[in-house]
Image (cartoon, helix red, strand yellow):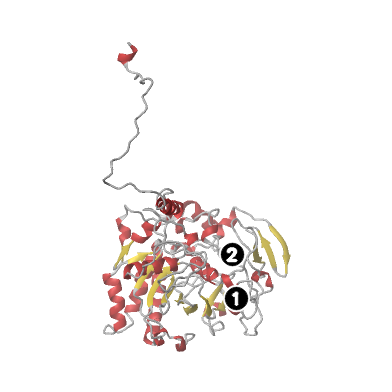
Amino acid sequence: MKGIMKKDDPRQDSSSPIVSMIFTHQARMRCFVRKTIQPIVGTMQKGSIVGTLNDVDDDNEDDYDSEDEFEALGGPNEIVNVDRDDDELTTREAIFERPDYLDDYEKLPTGDKHDGYQTEVILGGGKGFSLPRFKNGSVLEYVITSDAINIRLLIDGEVDEKKEKYIYYVLPGDEFKDIGAVQGRYNVTPFNPIKLQNNTYQVAPGQKYIFYVVRHGQATHNLLKSKMEKLGNVLTGKKDTSLTDEGKQQARRSGAKMASLLKNESVLAPGHLFSSDLKRTRETATNFITGLLNNIDEASADYKKIADVSDKHSLIVLPCAHELAFIKSGNCDAEQAMLPTPPENQTSCSLSNRDCNYEGHFDVNWDEYYRFYGSSTRSKMCKTCGRRRCKDTDMVTEAIRIINDQTGMNTVRPIRFAQGTKRTDGLKTRQGTWMSNPYGGKRGKNTMRRRKNKTRKTRKSHNRKRITRSKPKKSHKKVKNTKKSRK
């Protein structure tokens, strides 16, 4: 397929990669990319990964109107936005992924315009830059080793709606061939491959994880056009929306494109499948895998591997893969508290809803999800059940932990390693990072603290007689207020 270079073929590596597929959402993908490239934002403006993302004409110059969007992380309430003129198709606009209908009843103060930009005060925002969007059914590839993270766009997906103010990613070289962009329905920009140092994930030397991150197909809430429709949806809209018939076909067509890449040996067959807690990603998974299997040889090893995953293994509901509002600073999970959650992003599943345990030909496994959120869901979290928080992790970190637990690769105790601490498992130590913490949250930290302090005390042996204190005598007994006492 055009835009996918075979020289980056993961099959050429002598190691055996662990391949997974995550079905997630638009803003989640943008937040994840934004968070990944955060270490180089503001330090290498031109010629960097950030500059490469936005250098459309290959002139080594940034195509944004101002360098303000590349400044390092600023104050907690500062957002740089773009005041776009609809007549200027080449002008970038800031895309803050909060639902459009929120602007209908919450007007935000704006600052002075400067070089086509304006500063906008957003609740929970942060100073940063915007990222273009991913189309329905688009697929990103994340290759993670102990030293590096490589990201590239494999499938750019489809968009049927008319969204003139939106900018979507396409494969490099296809920015002038996209039919929707030619017709003026939306704007496009290429997603050039990204490579940066791995300072985020704990990966053993010689190990490689490959994640294919897929955006869901068109859902019913994506068809809302007018402001009144969107405002009505936030008030009385349906929770946990499903795919439209077109959205299911989009997922199948993306699966067919993935099959072509598989035949060309540009990608590997996934051995683990994950989805978010929202129905539209589970529906996308079933249709995507159907389109994939329908377009590869049933006698091939890839077909047997994928069929084995879909028939004998579960579709795992992955914590922190749900939809959310895009925050320019990249701290999307940490800055969601002040933003209302639209009904389409609220899961309808619970422990008592057995219909959520199946989706098409998949068994849906919620075990890791409920364990993360303290035997509950993210919308009904129990504050005293040892739940964990997405601001302290991300979906790939959780996926790696789950995979390692299933394969018996997690041999490290869930403790924090300070800088300079020696380790015996061959893994690199990252300052200020946590290994898997099954306790989670404040309760987990308190549990670990109590256990640490308890080792310093003298423990009583089980066969020693228990020393008890004499109970103080009560000075008086409380008289019960009964008919007999009143007599």
Residue 135 position, x and y percent, is: 49, 73
Foreground: 392 or 430?
A: 430
Nearer-the-camera pick, 225 or 482: 482
Is 467 situated above or below 9?
above
> Circle 2 — which element?
loop
Residue visible at 30% across and 78% down in the picture: 305
Badge 2 density bin: few <14, some 14–19, many ≥20, Cα 10 Å: many
Classify 117 as above or below 450: below
Q: Residue 253, percent across and down?
A: 40, 77
Question: Amino acid type of disc 2?
Answer: Ser
Q: Is residue 4 above or below residue 286?
A: below
The one nearer the camera, 279 or 320, is 320
Give whichever of 356, 385 is nearer the camera: 385
- Disc 2 and disc 1: Cα gap in Å? 14 Å
Is residue 244 in sight in this rendering? no
User: Mark 1: which amino acid?
Assistant: Val
Residue drawn 33% across the image and 53% down it: 351
Marks 2/1 in contact by CB < 8 Å: the verdict is no
Residue hosting label 1 = 50
Residue 67: percent from left, percent from top? 68, 72
At horizontal 64% and vertical 55% (from top left) the residue drawn is 108
Q: Is residue 454 visible?
A: yes
